[in-house]
Image: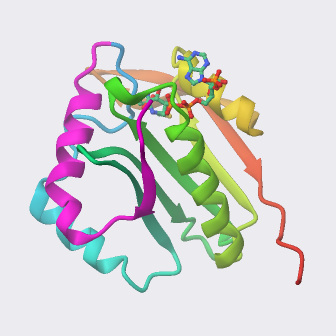
Amino acid sequence: MSNFTIRQAEPGDAAALVQLAREVGAEPEGWLISTSEWRGAGDERRYLRSLRRSRDAAVFVAETPGGIVGRLSVGRDPHPASTHVADLGLMVAKGHRRQGIGRALLERAVDWAQRMGVSKLELHVFPHNEPAIQLYEAFGFRREGYRERHYRRDGGLVDAVLMAYEVMPTLPE
Ligand SMILES: CC(C)(COP(=O)(O)OP(=O)(O)OC[C@H]1O[C@@H](n2cnc3c(N)ncnc32)[C@H](O)[C@@H]1OP(=O)(O)O)[C@@H](O)C(=O)NCCC(=O)NCCS
């Protein structure tokens, strides 16, 4: 089992996060919606720096003594009528799956949402991504819709499942 901690990403994590995304993105199953166009380490560092005081987006990492093995990004919807909604993206390194890291990152996203006044988390997942769909459903996400030909991939257009999670407000102490 991995001994891991979850924390907010820092600009110095940029290279490790780009590497993680490239590795997961290169898996033949094609799990990720963004793959080849993943930003370089310089852009990633600038992005992480820009998040420091942001109430609109955050990146969390799972770290083991051997390095970063998971990433969750969350970003508030920019539309003025849906700023209570945030979109998330998640990945865990292949050698560290099924050890509770994905779930722990989702828990941190829910905590962030509660603090930022976000009441709905949403995400898109490819229909063939059974591991992710199983995790999201076990966590409490529900299928909200099916987006046909919604993403460009390998020169074609592919479908995605839209899922959402209702964030319960924290009770006052
Ligand atoms: C999806 C992903 C993030 C799951 O991360 P993880 O750290 O392995 O998930 P967890 O260990 O927290 O799993 C929690 C629960 O989710 C479910 N689950 C996770 N992976 C599963 C799998 N391969 N098959 C069945 N259920 C699975 C199980 O209910 C699991 O609980 P259990 O292990 O006690 O049975 C990981 O597989 C991954 O990074 N995949 C590639 C990238 C990706 O698909 N990202 C999501 C894009 S939308």
Q: Give me the residue at 65% from left, 65% from top.
A: 111
Q: Quadrant of residue 43?
A: bottom left
Q: Give me the residue at 19% from left, 59% from top.
A: 14
Side of 5 where 108 appears, left or right? right
Q: Give me the residue at 29% from left, 30% from top.
A: 24
Residue 116 percent location from the top left of the image: 64, 77
State the residue in front, 82 or 105: 105
Locate the N terminus and report the quarter of the image it occupies: top left
Q: Quadrant of residue 162?
A: top right
State the residue in front, 157 or 11: 11
Asked whether the viewer can see residue 72, the reply is no
Span of residues in magenta: 1-28
Residue 159 percent location from the top left of the image: 52, 23
Side of 65 where 103 appears, left or right? right
- Seen in the picture, residue 132 relative to 163 is either above or below; the reply is above
Side of 47 where 7 appears, left or right? right
Residue 19 percent location from the top left of the image: 17, 42
State the residue in front, 126 or 110: 110
